[in-house]
Image: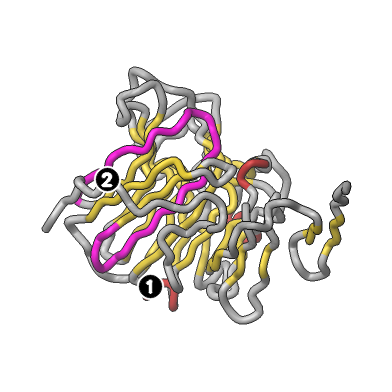
Amino acid sequence: MRKILICAFVLFFPFSVCLGQTSQSWSTIPVDLIVSMNTSSANTPLTSDIINAGTVSYNCPVGTTCSWGAPAGNSFVVGPNQAGLTNLGPVSMNGTGGVTYPAQSLNFNSVGHNDGDAGPASVDILTFTGAPAQATAVSALVGIKLGPAYQPLSGDDWDAFIFWNTPGYYAVIQFNSQCTGSAGYGVRIEVKPTAHSPCIAITPQQSYFYSLYWNINTGVANLYVWTTSGTPVGNVTVTAGDKGGGGLSQVWIGNNENGSNAGTFTYFQNTMINWTTAPSPLFWTGGTPVAPPTGLGTTNVQ
C-alpha cells in the first residue's frame, strides 16, 4: 500500500502537522525553552530582536525572564536550516498553554557562528531571572553542525555551549581536534576549576545531537552524543571540584575559546533547555536504547 503524506498548517501553532511519517516511534520530550528560529531569513545578520523572536517558552517570558543579549560583533548570522537536525520525536513545551511540536516539524533556521571569530566572548548570551534562575539542575539538547575541518596541528579548544551559575561556575560542551588522538575532532565536558571528561570522537563538519546535563549542587555533568538518526555515539561524565551552588544564570553559544577557522560557520539548531525536571539525557527514547554514562574516571574532587 502506498503511503500518502498529508500536511496541514495549524492556526496559531508555528508548525505543520504531517500524517503518514514513519518517525513517530520516538517518545515525547519535555522542554522549558526552545530556540526554533522560525523567524527572519537565512544569512541575515543575527540581532537580539531576531533570536528573541525565534525563541519559544511558556515558563519563561522571552525578552524578560529569558532574554538574549546582542550577539558579539559580526560573529553571528541567521543560519540556513540544517535538515538533519530536525526533532526526531515530539517536543512538549512545559508551562500553561504549552504546545506539542510533532516529530519532524521543527524545520526552520539555525544560528550560525563565524568560525573565524575566536573567543573569549565570541558568543551570544541567554540570561535567566525569576524561577529559572533558582534551578539547581539543568539539561540541554542542541543540534550542532561543526564548521571547521580537521586541524591536525592546532589542538585548540572550541567552547561552543556553556551553562553558567550565579557565582560564575560552568559546564561546557568543548570541541578539540587533538583530544582523541585520531584524525578527527573530539567533544568533551569542561568544568571549573579546569577539569575535563574523556573525549568522544566525532567526524569533522558533520551534524550531531548533543545533550549536556549539569547538577549545579553536586557538580556532576553528563554529555551524550547521537547521530542525526538517533544512533548513540558516546557519553561521558565529569564532576566539578568547585560546585558553586546558586541557580542557572546564563547559557552561552558560539565560541568562548581560542579555536579559529576562517571561511566556515558552525550551526546551532533547535537548542532546547529543561530546568524543570532536567532529565539526563534530554533525548527521545524508542529508537536505539541509551547506555548509562561511561568515562567516570576523570573526576576533580574538592
User: Tag 2, which secondary structure?
Assistant: loop
Reading the image, the residue beneath label 2 is 295
Specify the farthest residue to the left. 302
The residue lying at 54 percent from left, 28 percent from top is: 264
Residue 50 - label: none
Q: Position of residue 256 (x, y in %)?
A: 38, 42
First to last magenta residue range? 193-220
Height in image: 90 above or below 144?
below
When asked about the image quadrant of residue 53, the answer is bottom right
Height in image: 161 above or below 175?
below
Specify the farthest residue to the top. 153
Residue 208 located within the stretch drawn in magenta = yes
Q: Is residue 265 left or right of residue 253?
A: right
Q: Is residue 122 visible?
A: yes
Q: Is residue 74 visible?
A: no
* Circle 2: residue type: Gly
Q: Quadrant of the C terminus?
A: bottom left
Give 167 or 5, whichever is nearer the viewer. Answer: 5
Q: Position of residue 72 (x, y in %)?
A: 48, 45
Q: Position of residue 250 (x, y in %)?
A: 41, 61
Residue 273 located within the stretch drawn in magenta = no
User: Tag 1, which secondary structure?
Assistant: loop
The residue lying at 67 percent from left, 71 percent from top is: 99
Give the Cα separation between the discs numbered 2 and 1.
Answer: 26 Å
The residue lying at 50 percent from left, 35 percent from top is: 146
Reading the image, the residue beneath label 1 is 135
Q: Is residue 179 left or right of residue 1?
A: left
Q: Position of residue 174 (x, y in %)?
A: 36, 41
The residue lying at 29 percent from left, 65 percent from top is: 216
Give 252 or 87, whichever is nearer the viewer. Answer: 87
When asked about the image quadrant of residue 98, the answer is bottom right
